[in-house]
Image: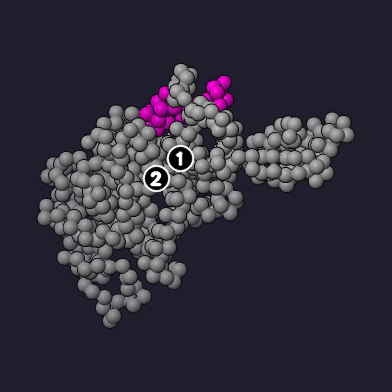
Amino acid sequence: MKLFNSLTRQLEDFEPINPPNVGVYTCGPTVYSYVTIGNWRTYFLGDLIVRTLKFKGYKPTYVMNITDVGHLTGDNLGDADIGEDKLEKAAKQEQKTAWDVANFYANDFLEGYRKLNLTQPFSFSRATQHIKEQLAMIKQIEEKGFTYRTSDGIYFDTQKYEAEGNEYGKLSNIDQVKEGARVEPNPEKKDPRDFALWKFSYPSGRNFDPEKDNPSQKRAMEWESPWGLGFPGWHIECSAMSTKYLGDQFDIHIGGEDLRSTHHPNEIAQTEAVTGKKPFVKYWLHGAFLLVNGGRMGKSLGNAYTLHDLEKKEYKPEHLRYFYLTGHYRQPLNFTWENLGSAKKAYEHLLERLAEFGKDVAERKPGKLSEKAVSYDSQFTKALENDLQVPQALATLWEMVKSDLPAIEKYQLLISWDEVLGLNLAQATKEHGFNYTYTGEKSGIKITSIVELPSEILRHIDDREVARKDRDWETADKMREAIESQGYVVEDTEDGVVVRQ
């Protein structure tokens, strides 16, 4: 199995540190708002990797963090150490406490996670539940001599880190890291690349002073520390929690490509400052952005769609999941409603075919796969082994579905491959037989379908049947064309009309 390692910028053979065990960590959401479908693509990547590892016989231990404190708004401007805490800002806007905001959006995330059938991690680690571990790691970094104090917090000293023979910025170009900020640099920083490990709630780490401080600015989330009252920097949580659950070294770290510039280099630096020069993570995998109509996604653009937005348009989480499968994780994927509609049709067509195959399975017991079926299975697996080339795997799937393999073998392969695809095909087969039945109002004919049919399509089918009874072939052909133009196929059977997509 080969994976593209962002650390070395090349395709590498995957060799776990302690096979067959594999430690996997994914940077999860900051729960100040609803998760967008762009964010979900990253979490889908984590799920895909874990599923593929299991498919290959490995035993992954999967951890994902939930950031519920410390992620500042300055991150959007290129300096994650300035601005308001995103949770505190959302609390003011929604007139709730930061704790209430975090719990609400964390629960919404977990519900969406379930709907998308993403692999349940060994641990969903919340930053606020691991303050002790973060303080302990900051203390270790301080004891190693890599910190200094400013009026607003405790910072990591990148120059000192490099002076001792370490390399900072392994995942990104160092010049880009230095020049990435689009805001005035903090004059108290020794180097623009330095980053906060602990932020003070109030200047110099003192407590809230009602005579000096605005009561409306009092933080809901703050903790005592050896350096003063405050809260953790954004980066330290991932190092503290990943090493707690996966050890000082583990195999795979996953995140969106936007985390390559500073967040992940900072994770490496602060962790290896504690553990020594041994590599923190062996393989770094980064997912590309999700585009919308060929451009960037953004709340200010009104196109930062969520699962709720999709559900309002009657799309299911399975449709979005299938859409993600159509793109390779290192390539931008373009979201349009038309593309999502195509994914929906493909998914429901797959269910329809699987329901057909399932009828054969009910009558026969699965047996040893034929040589041709084994060949398809090998093609599917090789696509996954080649840096998770899921579009190639999907192409193999449809080639197999359309082949002359016996239905029972097609069914066996689809159920097996779904261990990776995560489309919940076995359950969907039970739930989605030809369970939509209609009777034409004019023709009285029985109409069956695996999917719910729009009233317009039902009307066309009904009119076509009336025309056929009247031997009006011209009208019947027009009705068939109208049906097919909407992506449906009509089959005339002894039991009535069967409609497919």
Q: Crowding near pointer 1: few (<14 within 10 Å), some, many (20+)?
A: many
Give the prevailing secondary structure in the magenta stretch: helix
Counting from the top left corner in percent of width and height, residue 308 is at 53, 55
Looking at this view, is 253 or 84 the one in front? 253
Counting from the top left corner in percent of width and height, residue 185 is at 29, 56
**Residue at point 55%, 39% (across, down):** 429
Relative placement, left or right, of 487 versus 287 is right
Say if the magenta span includes residue 343. no
Residue that mark 1 sits on: 422
**Distance from Cα at disc 2 to Cα at disc 1:** 9 Å
Q: Is residue 399 visible?
A: no
Looking at this view, is 117 or 243 the one in front? 117
Residue 119 image label? 2
Q: Amino acid at mark 2?
A: Thr
Relative placement, left or right, of 295 versus 252 is right
Q: Where's the C terminus, which quadrant? A: top right
Relative placement, left or right, of 453 versus 333 is right
Say if the magenta span includes residue 393. yes
Question: In this picture, which residue range is highlighted in magenta?
Answer: 378-407
**Residue at point 45%, 32% (across, down):** 416
Name the element at disc 2.
loop
Q: Amino acid at mark 1?
A: Gly
Q: Crowding near pointer 2: few (<14 within 10 Å), some, many (20+)?
A: some
**Residue at point 34%, 60% (across, down):** 68
Q: Is residue 212 above or below residue 277?
A: below
